[in-house]
């Protein structure tokens, strides 16, 4: 009987010991799983379609170079390690967020890129415009080249960048907020100006450029805000890629718009030229005092969520408040 009880106790001890080992292993596995999940977030990668086919990039990138696409990054709360520039020319409308960020030349010289030690490089679709080849940049850091479609569509850029950086919820949120802003602005402007027409003229170097209806911010003004297009603007058709064609003052005399936003830096010679031109002064907007001079053309001549928001604010403040 005693021998049987001893055997029973031994079996119980073995069972309890095994239970403790299994429990410990389970705890270790849970900790390992939790640790793996945390490490997974730190080392996560994502594969996306790009101009160069499928490319795998890290989602934990912090030092990002994305020349001329800083608008989309900033919309997601991400500050690049360097900002686009052509000499001293920069995207002025972003300077409230990028004033302390150093410049990098628009064609991405390889030495400059290496100096900033990026862990992600985002290129536009026009790869021939860069100093280095795609492969050169890939040797420095994981490199993503935007597709033709995404390069010309800032909403798609925000969604792609959201996927890249694990900020898809943020991307959806900022786009929804923007859509609500557009809706509110459209309602205000409809009440304020009704069927009146609006045109945008940019002056630089005493030359004048009339925005086609799909040129940069004009697409927001006409397509999203629902503002009517003047006849002469409609006759221009689609904007030819990124090329700007100067227009003569004589041609501007045909601009029968109710409101004109005249865009030019403070002291720009072209603004003075138009103010002293009897031809310009004869157009309806000038005669009614509805030529609105804007001394920061940068967000009007760019594409992006921030550029659009700034332009919408300017239009609403000028015409509806």
Image (tube, rainbow, N blue to C red):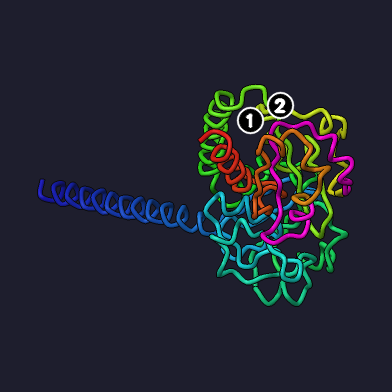
Provide the residue span drawn in magenta. 245-273
What distance separates the C-alpha of mark 2 from that of mark 1? 9 Å
Tag of residue 228: 2
- Identify the image quadrant of residue 135: bottom right
Residue visible at 63% across and 30% down in the picture: 225
Q: In the structure shown, which secondary structural element does the residue marked by tag 2 occupy?
A: loop
Q: Is residue 62 above or below residue 273?
A: below
- Compared to residue 102, the image places residue 294 above or below, namely above
Q: Residues within 10 Å of mark 2 (few under 14, many from 20)?
A: many
Counting from the top left corner in percent of width and height, residue 175 is at 56, 38
Q: Nearer the viewer, residue 175 or 52?
A: 175
Q: Which residue is drawn at the image coordinates 76% and 65% (left, top)?
A: 106
Residue displayed at 68% across by 44% down:
154
Of 285 and 163, which appears nearest the observer? 285
Q: Quadrant of residue 103?
A: bottom right
At 30% across and 50% down in the image, what residue appears?
Answer: 23
Question: At numbered mark 1, what does the secondary structure look like: helix, strand or loop?
Answer: loop
Residue under label 1? 225
Give the mark count.
Answer: 2
Q: Residue 257 magenta-drawn?
A: yes
Circle nearer the viewer, 2 or 1: 2
Which percent across, then down, holds residue 312? 59, 40
- Residue 62, position as x, y percentages in the image: 56, 63
Q: Residues within 10 Å of mark 1 (few under 14, many from 20)?
A: many
Give the left or right position of residue 2, taking residue 163 as reference. left
Q: Which mark is residue 75?
A: none
* Magenta stretch encompasses residue 190: no
Q: Quadrant of residue 201?
A: top right
The quadrant in which the N terminus is found is top left
Labelled pair 2, 1 in contact (Cβ < 8 Å): no
Relative image position of residue 68 (x, y in whole percent): 71, 57
């Amino acid at each position: 009987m005693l021998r049987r009880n001893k055997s029973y106790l031994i079996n119980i001890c073995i069972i309890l010991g095994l239970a403790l080992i299994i429990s410990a292993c389970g705890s270790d596995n849970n900790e390992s799983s939790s640790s793996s999940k945390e490490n997974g977030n730190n080392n996560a990668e994502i594969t996306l379609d790009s101009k160069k086919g499928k490319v795998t990039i890290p989602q934990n990138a912090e030092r990002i170079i994305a020349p001329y696409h800083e608008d989309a990054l900033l919309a997601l709360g991400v500050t690049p390690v360097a900002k686009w520039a052509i000499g001293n020319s920069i995207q002025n409308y972003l300077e409230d967020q990028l004033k302390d960020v150093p410049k990098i030349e628009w064609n991405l010289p390889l030495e400059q890129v290496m100096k900033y030690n990026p862990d992600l490089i985002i290129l536009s679709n026009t790869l021939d415009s860069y100093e280095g080849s795609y492969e050169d940049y890939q040797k420095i850091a994981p490199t993503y080249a935007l597709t033709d479609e995404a390069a010309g569509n800032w909403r798609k850029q925000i969604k792609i960048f959201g996927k890249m950086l694990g900020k898809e919820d943020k991307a959806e949120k900022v786009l929804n907020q923007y859509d609500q802003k557009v809706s509110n602005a459209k309602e205000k402007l409809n009440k304020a100006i009704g069927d009146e027409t609006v045109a945008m003229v940019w002056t630089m170097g005493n030359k004048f450029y009339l925005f086609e209806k799909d040129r940069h911010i004009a697409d927001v003004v006409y397509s999203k805000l629902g503002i009517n297009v003047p006849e002469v603007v409609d006759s221009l058709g689609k904007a030819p890629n990124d090329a700007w064609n100067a227009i003569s003052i004589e041609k501007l005399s045909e601009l029968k718009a109710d409101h004109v936003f005249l865009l030019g830096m403070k002291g720009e010679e072209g603004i003075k030229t138009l103010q002293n031109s009897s031809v310009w002064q004869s157009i309806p907007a000038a005669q009614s005092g509805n030529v609105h001079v804007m001394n920061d053309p940068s967000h009007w001549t760019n594409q992006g969520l921030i550029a659009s928001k700034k332009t919408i604010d300017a239009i609403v403040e000028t015409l509806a408040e």
